[in-house]
């Protein structure tokens, strides 16, 4: 089953990005018991200018960022989706990724573009699942989940 709807906004479509996205999001769905739940995620790959416009419009922050997540459900509603099989298709939410920032962060952290993009996808996914990293305890739980998915996919820091 295809869990993602991938869009390229002002960037060239790229098979590596699309294939990696499918692989990573499929593993996230498997890990979080969402397989065969009739749920999808919208992923938009874009530019610094476009993500800045989204950030300004929806968060009132006038600067580019690496990833934005727009969940459609609260955490308790997601937990309900995990337990039930919906007949009606549901969109878990949208993840918007600034590919230029992914490249800069990969260089900055000294690992591959693939690893950084995979991390952005997993990070965005867990925000859609209701996880956050504002409080240290919540951050620890979210980071453990993110790292486990990447480890399961053998996408490591280099």
Image (cartoon, rainbow, N blue to C red):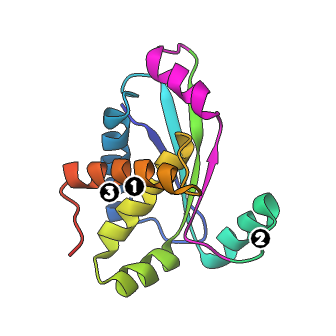
Toward which corner of the image does residue 44 lie, by quadrant? Answer: bottom right
Mark 2 touching mark 3, by CB under 8 A? no
Give the secondary structure at mark 1: helix
Give the secondary structure at mark 2: loop
- How far from the left and from the top, in percent, is residue 3? 43, 37
Instruction: Residue at 61%, 72% (x, y): give it.
Output: 65
Instruction: Residue at 31%, 34% (x, y): give it.
Output: 30
Of pointers 2 and 3, the one earlier in the residue sequence = 3
Instruction: Residue at 60%, 42% (x, y): give it.
Output: 93
The residue range painted magenta reads 64-87
Q: Which residue is mark 1?
A: 143
Q: Which mark is residue 125?
A: none
Give the secondary structure at mark 3: helix
Q: Quadrant of the N terminus?
A: top left
Q: CA distance from mark 2 to mark 3?
A: 29 Å
Q: Quadrant of the C terminus?
A: bottom left
Residue placed most toward the observer, 122 or 139: 139
- Within 10 Å of disc 2 (Cα), the crowding (few <14, some 14-19, many 20+) is few
Residue placed most toward the observer, 76 or 125: 76
Q: Which residue is mark 3?
A: 20
Instruction: Residue at 45%, 17% (x, y): give it.
Output: 83
In the rendered image, the vertical position of residue 86 relative to residue 98, given as above or below? above
């Amino acid at each position: 089953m295809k869990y993602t709807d991938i869009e390229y906004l002002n960037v060239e479509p790229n098979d590596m990005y699309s294939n990696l996205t499918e692989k990573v999001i499929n593993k996230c769905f498997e890990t979080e018991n969402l397989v065969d739940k009739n749920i999808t995620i919208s992923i938009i790959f874009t530019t610094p200018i476009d993500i800045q416009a989204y950030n300004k419009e929806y968060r009132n922050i006038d600067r580019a960022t690496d990833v934005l997540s727009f969940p459609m459900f609260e955490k308790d509603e997601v937990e309900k989706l995990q337990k039930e099989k919906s007949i009606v298709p549901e969109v878990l939410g949208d993840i918007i990724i600034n590919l230029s920032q992914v490249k800069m962060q990969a260089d900055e952290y000294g690992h591959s573009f693939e690893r950084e993009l995979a991390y952005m996808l997993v990070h965005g996914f867990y925000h859609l699942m209701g996880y956050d990293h504002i409080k240290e305890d919540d951050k620890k739980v979210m980071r453990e989940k993110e790292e486990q998915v990447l480890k399961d996919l053998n996408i490591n820091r280099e």
